[in-house]
């Protein structure tokens, strides 16, 4: 082999060595407080993709000190049987919620008490089957008590309430969002902005940022399948309550920053009502404080709280 050919061969071999880290998986040692979901979210993969790449069930509990592999996009795609670089990342945006792309954090628990209006539903009927009044459902979702609900309208119901119609009638594919505050406007915030607002209200900046990332990925345009809106995923009823009971002023329903203000003020009240217990306050944020008091912290809520606490490390302590 000539010198020139040997040099080219050596250069090609070095190029392959240099290219390997970008195309191969990276080992990660599980740290205290981490979950399969939080590791996946930090790596911009779905839990399903990370689990498949490691031969684990999606609900697997990772053990502190265990090493798992953060796959390349190609490896994750192959594990999922999707094929093609970027296919695994695309699974994160499959079936996006109303109003915006699914954030990396959406692999966490689904919204509690989500319901989509089916043919033949009425607000009164939905409320009756949920064990609450029509006025309660209306307030929670920013509707008039006598409102005519349109098929496909996304509603928040009390945690654990699932109208019997949901078991026999498939939810419509097209979904509608009730016109109410806060408004899911385009715009994003940064962790720094969330932290500054949280600090001004006496809430841990890292905790508020973790909740915001878990809820929306900092995307103010997001509307969940339970009618929660904006960066902090606030329900219309919660927005009205915060305005009247905590802020004592009108909040701008179109502002991403005001959405953060409302969510932080609400989180602060929940933590205070829980005697300073941040985990219980976060549980109330997801499940609803009345439900936590009445039913205790539900399994999905425990998972949500663990995800939030694991995420705090990304935003300080």
Image: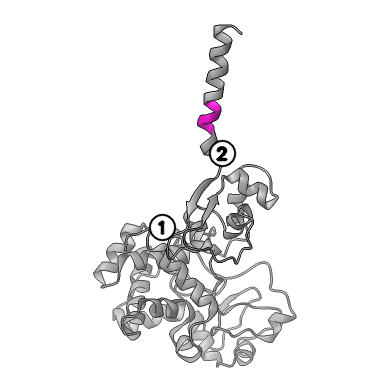
- Image height of 16 relative to 314, above or below: above
Task: Choose between 65 and 308: the one closer to the eye.
Answer: 65
**Looking at the image, do the residues carrying marks 1 and 2 touch, with CB atoms under 8 Å apart?**
no
Q: Secondary structure at mark 2?
A: helix
Q: CA distance from mark 1 to mark 2?
A: 31 Å
Residue at 56%, 80% (x, y): give it.
113
Judge the density around disc 1: few (<14), some (14-19), many (≥20) Cα neighbours within 10 Å. Answer: some
Task: Choose between 56 and 64: the one closer to the eye.
Answer: 64
Give me the disc on residue 61. Answer: none
The x, y position of residue 282, in whole percent, is 41, 76
Mark 1 or 2: the one toward you: 2
Give me the disc on residue 23. Answer: 2
Magenta span covers which residues?
Answer: 15-19
Residue at 39%, 76% (x, y): give it.
279
- Image height of 123 relative to 95, above or below: below
First in sequence: mark 1 or mark 2? 2
Residue 77 is at least partly visible in this image:
yes
Judge the density around disc 2: few (<14), some (14-19), many (≥20) Cα neighbours within 10 Å. Answer: some
The x, y position of residue 234, in whole percent, is 44, 73
The quadrant holding residue 84 is: top right
The x, y position of residue 241, in whole percent, is 38, 83
Q: Residue furthest front?
A: 65
Q: Which residue in the structure is indicated by mark 1?
A: 188
Q: Secondary structure at mark 1?
A: loop
């Amino acid at each position: 082999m000539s010198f020139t050919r040997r040099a080219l061969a050596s250069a090609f071999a070095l190029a392959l060595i240099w290219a390997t880290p970008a195309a191969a998986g990276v080992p990660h040692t599980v740290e205290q407080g981490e979950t399969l979901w939080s590791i996946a979210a930090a790596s911009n993969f779905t839990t399903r993709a990370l689990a498949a790449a490691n031969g684990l069930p999606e609900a697997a509990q990772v053990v502190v000190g265990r090493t798992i592999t953060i796959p390349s996009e190609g490896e994750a795609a192959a594990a999922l049987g999707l094929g093609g670089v970027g296919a695994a990342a695309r699974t994160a945006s499959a079936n996006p919620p109303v109003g915006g792309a699914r954030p990396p954090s959406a692999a966490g628990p689904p919204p509690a008490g989500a319901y989509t209006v089916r043919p033949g539903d009425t607000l009164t009927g939905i409320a009756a089957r949920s064990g609450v009044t029509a006025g309660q459902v209306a307030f929670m979702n920013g509707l008039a008590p006598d409102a005519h609900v349109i098929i496909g309208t996304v509603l928040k119901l009390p945690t654990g309430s699932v109208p019997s119609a949901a078991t026999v009638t498939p939810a419509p594919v097209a979904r509608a969002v009730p016109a109410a505050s806060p408004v899911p406007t385009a715009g994003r915030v940064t962790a720094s902005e969330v932290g500054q607002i949280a600090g001004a209200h006496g809430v841990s900046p890292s905790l508020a940022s973790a909740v915001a990332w878990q809820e929306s990925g900092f995307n103010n345009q997001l509307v969940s399948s339970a009618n929660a809106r904006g960066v902090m995923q606030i329900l219309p009823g919660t927005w009205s309550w915060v305005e009247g009971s905590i802020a004592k002023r009108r909040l701008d329903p179109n502002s991403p920053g005001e959405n953060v203000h409302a969510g932080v003020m609400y989180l602060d009240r929940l933590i205070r009502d829980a005697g300073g217990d941040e985990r219980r306050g976060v549980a109330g944020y997801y499940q609803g404080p009345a439900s936590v008091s009445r039913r205790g912290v539900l399994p999905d809520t425990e998972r949500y709280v663990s995800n939030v606490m694991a995420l705090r490390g990304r935003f300080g302590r």
